[in-house]
Image: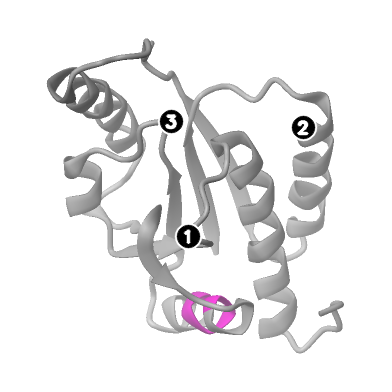
């Protein structure tokens, strides 16, 4: 399985980089995982709705340029479907079983995901009704993907 995480913005915090490196290392036993960072647009305070849509559109174009036509796309969205860890593992297993071995998880910028990216999405997934910084979401996502592989293989992992 090949998993790509397409995320808006650069990761700066050392502690997050260390956590992400740890899960990337753990995941090498299960899948090829790549993280692609796309540049975020400057989003000053007090933007109009039109300006916000333009920021999302530009970020969306950058995201879509890294997604191949045969890739199953899972966008992380606050209003997406909520799955528990076992359900996410079952979804990943189902995709692998039915030949969808390329999966891209998309983490949008501070304003969310563009309409074009939402249309390209095969599954909108929500981790919570709460909002998380996109940098933190990378770490949470990698941990859940790792947990999912452990569940699929029947390997122990703390609950």
With respect to residue 8, does 138 lie above or below?
A: below
Image point (51%, 24%), residue name: 9
**Spatial CA span between label 1 and label 2:** 25 Å
Quadrant of the rendered image containing residue 50: top left
Residue 157 is inside the magenta segment: no
Q: Nearer the viewer, residue 76 or 100?
A: 76
| Frontmost residue, 9 versus 110 | 110
C-alpha gap between disc 3 and disc 1: 15 Å
Task: Please provide percent x and percent y for residue 100.
Answer: 39, 70
Q: In the shown orientation, is residue 68 left or right of residue 38?
A: left
Q: Which residue is label 1 attached to?
A: 129
Which quadrant: the C terminus? bottom right
In front of the other: 146 or 75:
75
Q: Is residue 75 visible?
A: no
* SS type, badge 1: loop
The crowd level at tag 3 (other Cα within 10 Å; few <14, some 14-19, many 20+) is some
Image vertical order of residue 78 relative to residue 137, above or below: below
Q: Which residues are magenta?
A: 88-92
Q: Is residue 33 left or right of residue 39?
A: right
Say what secondary structure mark 3 lies in.
loop
**Residue for badge 2:** 17
Does 91 lie within the magenta span? Answer: yes
Inter-mark Cα distance, 2 to 3: 19 Å
Q: Is 158 left, or right, of 80 in this rendering?
A: right
């Amino acid at each position: 399985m090949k998993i790509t995480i397409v995320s808006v913005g650069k990761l700066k915090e050392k502690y997050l980089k260390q956590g992400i490196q740890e899960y990337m290392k753990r995941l090498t036993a299960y899948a090829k995982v790549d993280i692609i960072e796309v540049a975020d647009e400057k989003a000053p305070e007090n933007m109009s709705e039109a300006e916000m849509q333009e920021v999302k559109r530009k970020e969306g174009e950058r995201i879509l340029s890294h997604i191949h036509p045969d890739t199953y796309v899972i966008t992380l969205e606050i209003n997406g479907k909520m799955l528990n860890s076992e359900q996410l593992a079952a979804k990943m297993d189902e995709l692998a079983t039915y030949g969808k071995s390329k999966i891209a998880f998309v983490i949008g910028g501070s304003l969310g995901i563009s309409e074009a990216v939402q249309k390209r999405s095969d599954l909108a997934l929500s981790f919570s009704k709460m909002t998380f910084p996109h940098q933190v979401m990378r770490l949470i996502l990698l941990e859940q993907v790792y947990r999912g592989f452990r569940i699929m293989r029947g390997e122990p992992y703390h609950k």
